[in-house]
Image: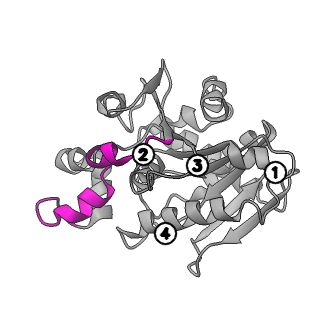
């Protein structure tokens, strides 16, 4: 992560800590989907009036040090725009398969719980699943395990990690993917084939409307990963890695439009 983005994420985290469910002016609550302290979602927005539901999975290159706090400003901005945002926390410690297992349980559980949470019919029908960086990798992997039959879903990975094999081979992200996987591909190919978005892209069902959003000034996850992935991609000229989740960025309106329309 570049120094500039380090500072941006630190600022977003500082802001996000203030936007706890108790302090936001919009209805919000926490829902635990497991017993581990990191197995929960924060639901921000008005379930009764929301125009769409956005399930948002934060990034951080699978590192334990990066939790959902830095994504709270984005969740709050989406709620301000009229969406119900379900912000997912998950275990980053312990390596694979914790992240994907947790994200799968969280997303599936949140979708099933929308009626119980009082989410109106329109917002349930306008379902968006988004993830930033490592979160983008996880939502792509999640979608690749879906059944062919089922409701339509808009899948919007933001600057996603899409090729775990190349990440490991090139030592990208200071070796974050190898640390997460815990083993090289040649020693446990099955683990990679369960999670690697590029290997599993063909398995994403047709009911998933997939579009990647990536900035061409990203110095954390190169935009070439998105360009090489077999799916439509919207390239944001001049956007950095942090721009895609920072409501103060001049690019954020474009990101919100990609999610909500």
Q: Residue furthest front?
A: 149
Can you tell which mark lies on residue 120?
1
Taking the magenta stretch, the answer to whether it contains residue 130 is: no
Residue at the disc numbered 2: 205
Is residue 198 rendered magenta in the image?
A: yes
Q: Which residues are magenta?
A: 183-207
Q: CA distance from mark 4 to mark 3?
A: 28 Å
- Relative to the observer, which residue lies in front, 66 or 203? 203
Mark 4 vs mark 3: in front: 3
Position of residue 131 measured from the top left corner of the image (x, y, whole percent): 52, 46
Q: Position of residue 148 (x, y in %)?
A: 44, 51
**Can see residue 238?**
yes
Quadrant (top left, top right, bottom left, bottom right) of the C terminus: top right
* Residue wearing tag 3: 151
Name the residue carrying label 4.
91
Image quadrant containing the N terminus: top left
The Cα–Cα distance between marks 4 and 2, rounded to whole angstroms, is 27 Å
Q: Position of residue 3 (x, y in %)?
A: 45, 38
Crowd tier of the residue under label 3, counting other residues whose Cα lies within 10 Å: few below 14, some 14–19, many 20 or above: few
Q: CA distance from mark 1 to mark 4?
A: 30 Å
Sequence-earlier tag: 1 or 4: 4
For the residues labelled 1 and 4, say whether their Cβ atoms are less than 8 Å apart. Answer: no
The disc, 1 or 3, on the residue closer to the chain's N-terminal end is 1
Q: Residue at x 82, y 53 (%)?
A: 47
């Amino acid at each position: 992560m570049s120094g500039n983005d380090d500072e941006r994420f630190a600022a977003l985290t500082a802001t996000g800590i203030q936007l706890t469910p108790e302090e936001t002016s919009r209805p919000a609550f926490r829902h635990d989907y497991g017993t581990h302290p990191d197995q929960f979602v924060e639901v921000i927005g008005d379930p009764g009036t929301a125009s769409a539901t956005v399930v948002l999975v934060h990034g951080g290159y699978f590192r334990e040090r990066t939790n959902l706090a830095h994504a709270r400003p984005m969740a709050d901005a989406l709620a301000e725009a009229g969406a119900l945002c379900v912000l997912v926390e998950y275990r980053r410690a312990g390596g694979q398969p914790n992240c994907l297992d947790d994200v799968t349980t969280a997303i599936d559980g949140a979708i099933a719980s929308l009626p119980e949470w009082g989410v109106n019919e329109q917002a349930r029908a306008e379902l968006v699943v988004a993830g930033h960086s490592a979160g983008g990798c996880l939502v792509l992997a999640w979608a690749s395990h879906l059944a062919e039959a089922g409701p339509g879903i808009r899948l919007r990975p933001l600057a996603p990690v899409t090729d775990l094999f190349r990440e490991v081979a090139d030592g990208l992200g200071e070796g974050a993917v190898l640390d997460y996987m815990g083993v090289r591909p040649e020693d446990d190919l099955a683990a990679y084939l369960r999670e690697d978005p590029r290997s599993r892209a063909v398995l994403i069902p047709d009911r998933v409307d997939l579009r990647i959003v990536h900035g061409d000034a990203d110095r954390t996850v190169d935009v070439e990963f998105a360009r090489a992935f077999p799916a439509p991609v919207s390239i944001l000229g001049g956007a950095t890695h942090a721009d895609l989740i920072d409501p103060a960025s001049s690019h954020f309106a474009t990101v919100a439009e990609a999610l909500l329309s």
